[in-house]
Image (cartoon, helix red, strand yellow):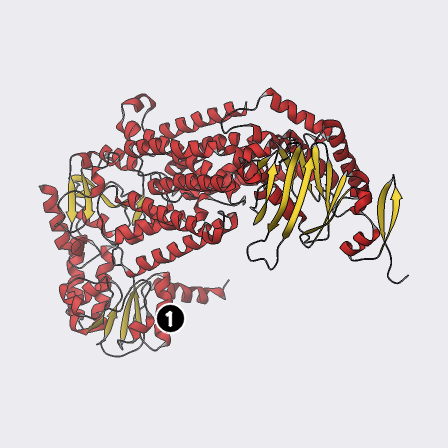
Amino acid sequence: MDRGLILDVRDVSFRYAGGARDALAGVSLAVATGEFVALLGPNGSGKTTLVRVALGLHAPRSGSAAVLGRPAGEWPRQALARVVGVVPQREDNLFPQRVRETVRLGRYPHLGAWTAERAEDRAAVERALERCDVQGLADRWLWALSGGEYQRVRIARALAQEPQLLVLDEPTASLDLRHEMELFELVRGLVDGQGLAAVLVTHDVNLAARFADRLVLLADGVVRAAGRPADVLRRDVAEAVFGWPLTISSVDDRPQITPLRRHP
Amino acid sequence: MRWLGLVLALLAATLAAIVLGPASVPAGELLHSPIFWELRLPRALLGLLVGGSLGVAGASLQSLVRNPLADPFLLGLSGGAGLGAVSAIALHLGGAWTLPLAAFAGALLALGLVFRLGLVAGSVLDPRVLLLGGVAVGAFCGAVTTAIVTLAEASELRNAFLWLWGGLSGASWQTVTLMAVYVPVPLVVLLAAARPLDLLTLGEEPARHLGADVLATRRRVYLAASLLTAAAVAVTGVIGFVGLIVPHLGRALFGGRHRVLLPASFLAGGILLVLADTLARTAVAPRELPVGIVTALVGVPLFVLLLRRWTAD
Amino acid sequence: MRRWAPLLALFALTCRASDRAATGGGGPAHRIVSLAPSITELLFALGAGSQVVGRTVYCLYPPAARAVPSVGDGLNPSVEAVAARHPDLVVLYRSPQTETAARQLEALGIHTMMLRHDRLEDVARTAQLLGQATGHAAAGDSIARTLDSLLSPPVPAPQARIAFVVWDAPPIVIGGGSFLDELAARAGAANVFHDLTAPSATVAIETIASRDPDWIAVVRDSAGAPPPGWAARSEWRTIRAVREGRFLNLPPDLFGQPSPRAPEAVRLLHRMLSQ
């Protein structure tokens, strides 16, 4: 296995118990250090499942998944959490919490049951807050934040883990334009500035094309196209995957798709 | 500062419990009086241990079943204990320790049933299953208990319900020693699970991604908290409201981190129960109120104050 | 105000009759269902045992009563089971639950009688009422006279202090509102909890200890001669009488409910205290 890869998923097939068809069929995904990869595809195409299999949460029926060269299923949970910071789609806070408290939870992979927090932990939390530009919100309650602020706080928590790979599952799903742009800029900045790798699952094809280094296009559990945005977002491929007539334009040297009206 | 206040409150409550009582013992004679040594002191210590156990169990279980209204007795343990106790009386089993042992056995049975339910169909002790299973098991045990009381002819059964209502009247050095030896182990298990519990409050998936072993944590917390509750019920019957409100008091004063919340809940639970018991013994002397009523009467105003603070924040 | 006076008087009259007597009917009742052990005992004592066709499952005294078919519970009676005995009179112990059962029985056309006797003077009056209803008025009067002669002399000076402990967890003692308190007083024992007006109450162990009774009375069969199980527990041994093993085992058929054999109960208790 290639040791320069943070994530190395080869040819995995997986079906959920009781599922009618394979959620993933022969899917491969390779993410190198310092790479920003976007996972795209319609609902139910297997994007979240691919992330779960890549991180060892599900065992594939065939194929392999490795993190830093070691099989994903063999990673002890806490050790994996020191390497990969995940911002899942859903989170449900049980009790009211302040921003700093929730970011501190990101240090837990570095702490045992009885070890107290050290100065380096507090420093890591402050750095994470700063990088995500939320240190001014540190003492606010989570429920008082806007959607965009809340997502940045969750990313800060993942950063506090001091990971090598950041995984974000549809982080901009309910954000307005400004906060969406801010989030993509943030992730791009972290990849460029800190050398993190990032895997971002999203519906926003155009922003993914603008910011990511590589795109992986999934449909029905199969990879339809993977590579640089210019290679993936070609009209014939994109129309087949998204099932809608499109026209391709270009912004910042990156392809942008625009869906056409059926009845002009 | 707040810890100091808590410790001072603890000392004050204990002092009140050993000085006040329906039998008037002059302060000078206290240390020579068997009432002090054999009744009040063990009773106060038992109150601290049982109240503390209920507070800690409540805090952990509220996080475990993801419900701020969870009480340690919501998981069927009180029903099981009542069934055990009533069965022992109906079968005319004598002996000084029969009731507590039977209640403990009944609680363990309920614990096992709910645990088993939580693992059905590959479930990983899903909080909702635990909660619903607990309510179901509790209701079932309660129904069987009522049936036994209705059908059996032992006239003492009517008094069994008074025992179930809960009270520290059975406090003695033996029960205190038993609890003091028993309680540390589940306590340590819960404290060790403090950080994973923090993570679990985010939800199952985020917790997993932050390194928590969800199933193992849930198993340990459920068993430890239930064992604490089972012991409390066996020794003092069902004392409600302590496990429900003390965790919220703890959160309001000390925040939600379990490393701090759990010890704070232990202390606060002990204080609340000892205060309530002192009131129960002295308010209508020479008669005694069931302590479960007093914990509710004392707890509700505190709870209301808390709610106002929350909404004001 | 003038208009209300006759209404008030009528209201007062109906309230004053605290025991509702049998309504209508003519001669004495021949098929009686008794829904309380004390009533069953009274009926047999009146000589009306052969007229009793139903009893509760708890009615075990006198032994002849056990031959009478049981109709179940007395405080929460099954109206159907009672009616199945075809009674012409049902006697109930008055309480909120039995009020409902009585109404249902009256709706079926069965005459009912509601009695309440927590104290011995009530037993005297109950004996007379039942005596008249069963055609044994003379026996009823005789029982009443016996009880009156027990109760009319002044209470003797107490020779000993006594506490009745009914239950241990939580500790329940008998107070001044109970017939046991009266029996004790007549036998020369002062109930240390006489000041509690209720028939029974929960107290703390330290209260019993501080009132320091000479004897602890427990209602149970004498066959169980050793002290009750809770007497071995260290917290109960703060009470002197428990430490010294000074227990009185009172037989339930004499001391379990207010009974026409109260004079016998008093004599027995007096003998036990003298030992």
User: Which residue lies most toward the right here?
Assistant: A264
Instruction: Determine the secondary structure under disc 1.
Output: helix
- B202 or C18, nearer to the observer: B202
The quarter of the rendered structure image containing the N terminus of chain B is top right
Residue A159 x/y as whole percent: 67, 31
Q: In the image as oriented, which residue stretches furthest toward the front?
A: A1
**x then y, percent, for residue B264:** 49, 30
Horizontal and vertical percent for residue C213?
21, 37
Circle 1 residues within 10 Å: few <14, some 14–19, many ≥20? some
Residue B194 vs C75, above or below: the answer is above
Amino acid carrying label 1: it is: Arg
Specify the quadrant that holds the C terminus of chain B: top right
Q: Is residue C187 above or below residue B20?
A: below
Residue C21 lies in quadrant:
bottom left
Residue with the mark numbered 1: C103
Residue A119, compared with residue B197, is above or below; it is above
From where the camera sits, is residue B43 visible?
Answer: no
Q: Nearer the viewer, residue C112 or B15?
A: B15
Q: Position of residue B116 (x, y in %)?
A: 42, 50
Q: Chain of mark 1?
A: C
Nearer to us in this view, C80 or B174: B174
Residue B305 located left or right of residue C255: right
